Amino acid sequence: MAGQRKAKTEHGFKQEFLSRVAGFVNRVMTATCRTHLVHPTYHSRRLTGESVRCIYAGWHNNLWHGTIPLQGQGNWVLVSSHRDGEIIARMLGRRGFGLVRGSSTRGGLKALRDFARAAQGGQGDLIVTLDGPKGPARVAKSGALFTASLTGLPIVPVGMWVDRAWRLKSWDRLVIGKPFSRVTVFYGEELRIPRGVPREELETTYRKQLEEAMAEVEKAARDAAVG
């Protein structure tokens, strides 16, 4: 028992150290990048008097830059309960994001219901990586669709283009912008899911619509960047 507690404590220290290092590197590198939002965030729209909220949905490989325009706004993120998710959770938690742990594969239905309750109890938006935590890359899981059906909030697909970037040899090919690169973010049209849609219909009908919408916003971000 003592050995297990020691190992758990050492593991916790390691995760805390790695999360702080990763967070520091992310802050330093993204600070040199120029981020251009083609459309305003929903937080900005609320500040102008609009009564809007949404579920931001993006691919896991854009996580390095994707949360930067959304921090400090009372938003909630669904983060995997996997070991690697702990590092991401600690990074995001220090930046003011609310966290719900779990995924469509680990933590399952309970995590998604907790995520929906966070939406009902807060004022910010929700953020989901569609193909997290472990892929396959660019294949949308049903978590965002299920949450949208539970809450009535629209899904906003997020496209991103970085003009000069490294792409890691990870399962998602994580995109890290090189110093002084330009990041273009495109928030697409809302995709609304009716309440109470059967899980089978989410998979067969709405998932295809969401993946098509993601392809469209990625092209739109690229076109906006080069146009």
Image (spheres, helix red, strand yellow):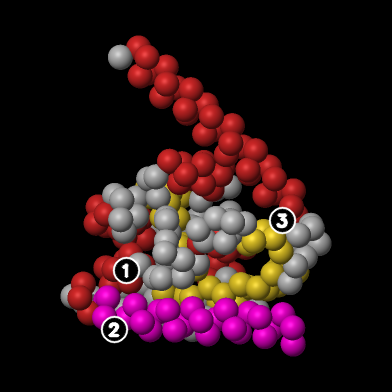
Name the secondary structure under disc 2: helix
**Residue lying farthest front?**
169
Nearer the N terminus, badge 1 or badge 3? 3
Q: Quadrant of residue 30?
A: bottom right
Q: CA distance from mark 3 to mark 2?
A: 37 Å
Across and down, in percent, residue 72 comes to 58, 54
Task: Give the magenta part as a residue range.
Answer: 202-227
Asked if residue 206 lies in the magenta stretch, the reply is yes
Q: Which residue is mark 2?
A: 205
Q: Nearer the viewer, residue 84 or 20?
A: 84
Query: Disc 1 on helix, strand or loop?
Result: loop
Question: What label sits on residue 212 in the rendered view?
Answer: none
* Residue pointed to by mark 1: 142
Majority secondary structure in the magenta region? helix
Identity, as a three-letter code, of the amino acid under mark 2: Thr
Q: Position of residue 43 (x, y in %)?
A: 55, 67
Amino acid marked by disc 3: Thr
Q: Is residue 36 above or below residue 167?
A: below
